[in-house]
Image (cartoon, rainbow, N blue to C red):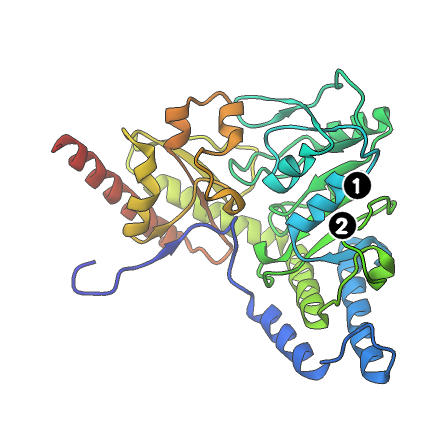
Amino acid sequence: MSGREQEIFYFDHNASTAVDDRVLQRFLTIEREFPANPSSLHAAGRQANEVVREASEEIAGALGLAGDAVLFVSGGTEANNMVVQTAGDPKLPALMAAVEHPSVYDAAARRGRVSWAVDHVGCVQVTPPEKEVGLVCLVQGQNEVGTLQPIEAASALAKELACPLHVDAAQVLGRVSLQQTLALADSITLSAHKVGGLRGMGVLLQPRQWDVAPLLHGGEQQAGRRPGTLSPSLAAATATAIRLAVEETESRAAAMAAAREAFLAALPNGLARRITPDHSLPNTLMLCFDVSDGRNLLPALDLAGVQASQGSACSAGAPTPPRVLAAMGLSDREAESCVRFSFSQHTTVELARRGAKVVGESLARMHRQVQNG
């Protein structure tokens, strides 16, 4: 942008999104007013513990659950690891597909995996496994392509197999209704920083039973389910973020979808092929660009002020594209040429249009550079 500061287009909200002012204010208020350790037995400690209890009740109330169904953890990765490593019969493998987040897929390495197939739009083909399994896992909204998955079919199969069903719902909170998953899953992962919460805390929900063992030892906090000193301010902020996300799901989803469609419509014709299917998270858009070397795509976009990604931030250092793309049948060259754009409710239609124009200009420069040798 000659003569003025370059405009930045942050289109990576599936990785993290800015804190909501209402959430931040809640955090600061509690941090100042309740500094004690919530496990301490004196009055200040009891007051801090009451804040944690109220935060649990706030989340439970927003989701229609009992308060003891809420477990505070450090984030989605810890929640997923707790379930995958310990739930069900940990001596038996977990049934899952290549659509899962690394904190589910890689966490199953010790117990083993039995794999479902994935179709060309990234939807899991829920079929009975060929061997005995101890746990069923299915992400509700795939974090890279955005495909919404058949939770009802997975739940029915889990019941047949007498296994718990774990659902990673980190990407759907505030974007898609959680009601079906809350009614069907045995454990559910939520991540606050995807919906305007603060980084460093997530929630593991267990609507029906607590059969998940702690990964850490050395304390009796949260009824011994997850030892370690809890932050009352983070708990309260997380509760606020989750409650607001649930209350505002419909309006947020509409705004995200409008931004995504405006971005798509503003891209030059023929510039990219849409990988994300219609039945998807409303804010997620995976595109495959026609370039000779996809490894240059993200650096070129970043240089132009467009901040996007190829997939999960947790595997951003990986030398290969997201595994889900290969499972969908894309070639290595196609997968390397894919970019995920993800929007928030604050991404305006006009911002999305301007960002798409910059993407088009950046790709045009790349093509000219190739042609000029």
Q: Are marks 1 and 2 in contact (CB under 8 Å)?
A: yes
Residues at marks 1 and 2, CA–CA distance in whole angstroms: 8 Å
Position of residue 122 measured from the top left corner of the image (x, y, whole percent): 56, 28
Position of residue 194 measured from the top left corner of the image (x, y, whole percent): 57, 54
SS at badge 2: loop
- Quadrant in which residue 366 is drawn: top left
Residue lying at 41% horizontally and 47% vertically, measured from the top left:
308
SS at badge 1: helix
Earlier sequence position, callout 1 versus callout 2 = 1
Quadrant for the C terminus in the image: top left
Position of residue 50 measured from the top left corner of the image (x, y, whole percent): 82, 74
From the viewer's perspective, tell me whether residue 138 is left or right of residue 22: right
Residue under numbered circle 1: 86
Residue lying at 81% horizontally and 60% vertically, measured from the top left:
218
Residue lying farthest to the front in this orientation: 218
Above/below status of 138 relative to 206: above
Specify the label residue 215 is tagged with. 2
Above/below status of 342 relative to 200: above
